[in-house]
Image (cartoon, rainbow, N blue to C red):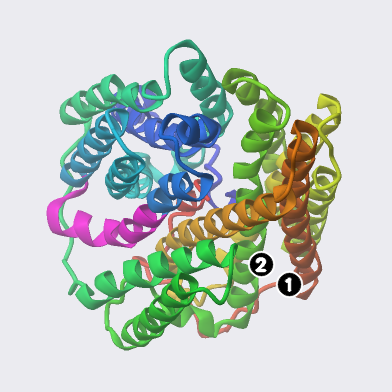
């Protein structure tokens, strides 16, 4: 984020008032989508109970949503070149709002999963297109301060999402966590129509149709296989998911490497520094985001907290992340990514090891301490890792890095959610088998959560050790940025 520091001298002819209304239109649309990424976690226990189903089924409301996000993020650039940024942004807001309304009237888990996928297909492009539009609206010498305004709702939304979700569930019903998007979506749509400027369309490159087909098949089938693997890695369903997904993934890689304008620019992995950085980012995302879906479950199912109380308990984690992020950004320029990733992932692994030893009688103070540690660890490590990955990309491919990293993060999160919930479900089943009284059942549930937190802690510890292989990215003397290749650093903000 340091790469876009504003020049101190402001041009006299520019005033923030000239772009405040377009900026407001974009922020309203973006905050709606960012909020929705956090509200469902708190609602999962209620959804399991309401639909009388199991956790492995309901977790697909998260997995399907994140896979849908990953499918459309790489298309944002092509669609804006083809149809114009304003038109595509309006369409995505409308689609996300429609998906939200459909979610609020879902009558079965299967319907809710399908409607969440519609939501994801709309929401995936809101952030990248919105950021790119703000980046164009702001003059170069004011981009730092104006993009900083975008950072405010991006930090507030994860903090407010669980609290709002808990309040809606407790005061009304889970339907309202989706239905509230209707008035917000309508307001965003009207503001965008009225205040967003029409943008010129760019030259439209050839669309990678085969990549578009293979990617969702590969990632969804692999996520399904990972989910079923939590129960048994040798079952027919697990093997089907892993084999079909694996074959589709291999074909996808071959197609992407041969296509002139690939959906995802995989050639960037030829840089060993980039590869080290992004693998470490994936490991940390599996540990962090996988565990984040478990904590609301633990608080409500084991500790007996309400949805609103759960949202309030989760608030310190988001606030700690908001404190750690700017600190990590400042320290990155001075000491680089390796020490920050080592410390951040070390803190996360410590927090998860604490959670792996808690019992039904553990006090709330220790749980909140663990959440604060996770938030700080995330703040210290995520932004430096994202910036390191951007810096490590070959200069001629750097403009294609943000779609790759954004899409890959959603895929990794979907794998983490599917894998850890499958692991949790199977371990709860084995630990409660033969339980004849309430105490034995509770102890079995706690043991299942402990095992899963311990697995997440081991993954985070592996990432902590893996961070030691990071190094300052090498720069080839002959590499230089072309005028059109400069990446938008703000695109990394949502990671």
- Residue 70 within the magenta-colored segment of the rendering: yes
The overriding secondary structure of the stretch rendered in magenta is helix
367 to 405, vertically: above or below: above
Which residue is nearer to you in this view: 460 or 355? Answer: 355
Tell me what residue is drawn at x 37 percent, y 21 percent: 176
Q: Residue 385: where, in percent of width, then height?
A: 64, 60
Horizontally, residue 170 falls left or right of residue 199, namely right
Q: Quick one: label 2, few (<14), some, or many (20+) residues within 10 Å? A: many
Q: Quick one: label 1, few (<14), some, or many (20+) residues within 10 Å? A: many
Q: Secondary structure at mark 1?
A: loop
Find residue 159 and name its label: none
160 to 447, vertically: above or below: above
Residue range (magenta): 67-85
Tell me what residue is drawn at x 50 percent, y 20 percent: 164
Q: Secondary structure at mark 2?
A: helix
Horizontally, residue 56 falls left or right of residue 29, namely right
230 to 249, vertically: above or below: above
Tell me what residue is drawn at x 34 percent, y 21 percent: 180
Q: Residue 28: where, in percent of width, then height?
A: 35, 27
Find residue 280 and name its label: 2
Horizontally, residue 109 falls left or right of residue 52, namely left
Tell me what residue is drawn at x 15 percent, y 41 percent: 198
Q: Residue 388: where, in percent of width, then height?
A: 63, 64
Which residue is nearer to you in this view: 495 or 199? Answer: 495
Q: Quarter-wise, where is residue 71 in the image?
A: bottom left
Q: Which residue is mark 1?
A: 470
């Amino acid at each position: 984020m340091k790469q876009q520091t504003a020049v101190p001298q402001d041009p006299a002819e520019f005033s923030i008032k000239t772009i405040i209304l377009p900026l407001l239109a974009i922020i309203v649309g973006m905050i709606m989508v960012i909020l929705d990424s956090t509200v469902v976690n708190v609602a999962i226990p209620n959804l399991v109970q309401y639909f009388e189903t199991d956790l492995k089924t309901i977790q697909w409301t998260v997995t399907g949503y994140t896979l849908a996000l990953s499918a459309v993020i790489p298309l944002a650039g092509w669609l804006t070149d083809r149809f114009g940024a304003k038109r595509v942004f309006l369409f995505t807001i409308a689609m996300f709002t429609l998906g939200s309304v459909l979610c609020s009237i879902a009558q079965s888990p299967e319907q809710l999963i399908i409607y969440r996928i519609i939501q994801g297909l709309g929401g995936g492009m809101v952030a990248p297109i919105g950021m790119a539009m703000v980046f164009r609206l702001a003059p170069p010498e004011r981009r730092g301060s104006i993009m900083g305004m975008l950072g405010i709702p991006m930090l507030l939304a994860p903090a407010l999402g669980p609290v709002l979700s808990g309040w809606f569930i407790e005061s009304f019903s889970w339907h309202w966590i989706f239905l509230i998007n209707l008035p917000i979506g309508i307001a965003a749509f009207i503001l965008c129509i009225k205040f967003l400027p029409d943008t010129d369309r760019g030259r439209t490159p050839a669309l990678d149709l085969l990549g578009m087909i293979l990617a969702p098949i590969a990632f969804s089938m692999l996520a399904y296989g990972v989910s079923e693997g939590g129960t048994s890695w040798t079952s027919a369903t697990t093997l089907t998911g892993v084999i079909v997904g694996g074959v589709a993934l291999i074909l996808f890689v071959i197609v992407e490497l041969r296509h002139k304008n690939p959906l995802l620019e995989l050639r960037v992995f030829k840089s060993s520094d980039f590869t080290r950085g992004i693998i470490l980012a994936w490991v940390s995302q599996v540990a962090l985001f996988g565990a984040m879906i478990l904590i609301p479950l633990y608080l409500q199912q084991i500790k007996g907290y309400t949805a609103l109380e759960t949202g309030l308990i989760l608030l310190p984690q988001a606030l700690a992340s908001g404190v750690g992020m700017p600190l990590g950004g400042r320290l990155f320029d001075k000491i680089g990514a390796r020490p920050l990733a080592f410390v951040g992932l070390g803190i996360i692994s410590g927090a998860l090891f604490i959670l792996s030893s808690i019992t039904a009688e553990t006090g709330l103070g220790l749980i909140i301490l663990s959440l604060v540690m996770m938030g700080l660890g995330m703040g210290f490590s995520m932004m430096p890792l994202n910036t390191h990955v951007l810096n490590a990309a070959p200069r001629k491919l750097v403009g294609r890095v943000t779609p790759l990293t954004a899409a890959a993060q959603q895929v990794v999160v979907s794998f983490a959610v599917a894998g850890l919930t499958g692991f949790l479900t199977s371990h709860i089943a084995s630990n409660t088998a033969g339980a004849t009284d309430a105490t034995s059942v509770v102890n079995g549930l706690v043991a299942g959560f402990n095992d899963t937190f311990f697995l997440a802690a081991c993954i985070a510890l592996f990432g902590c050790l893996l961070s030691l292989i990071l190094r300052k990215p090498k720069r080839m003397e002959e590499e230089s940025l072309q005028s059109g290749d400069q990446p938008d650093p703000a695109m990394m903000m949502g990671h």
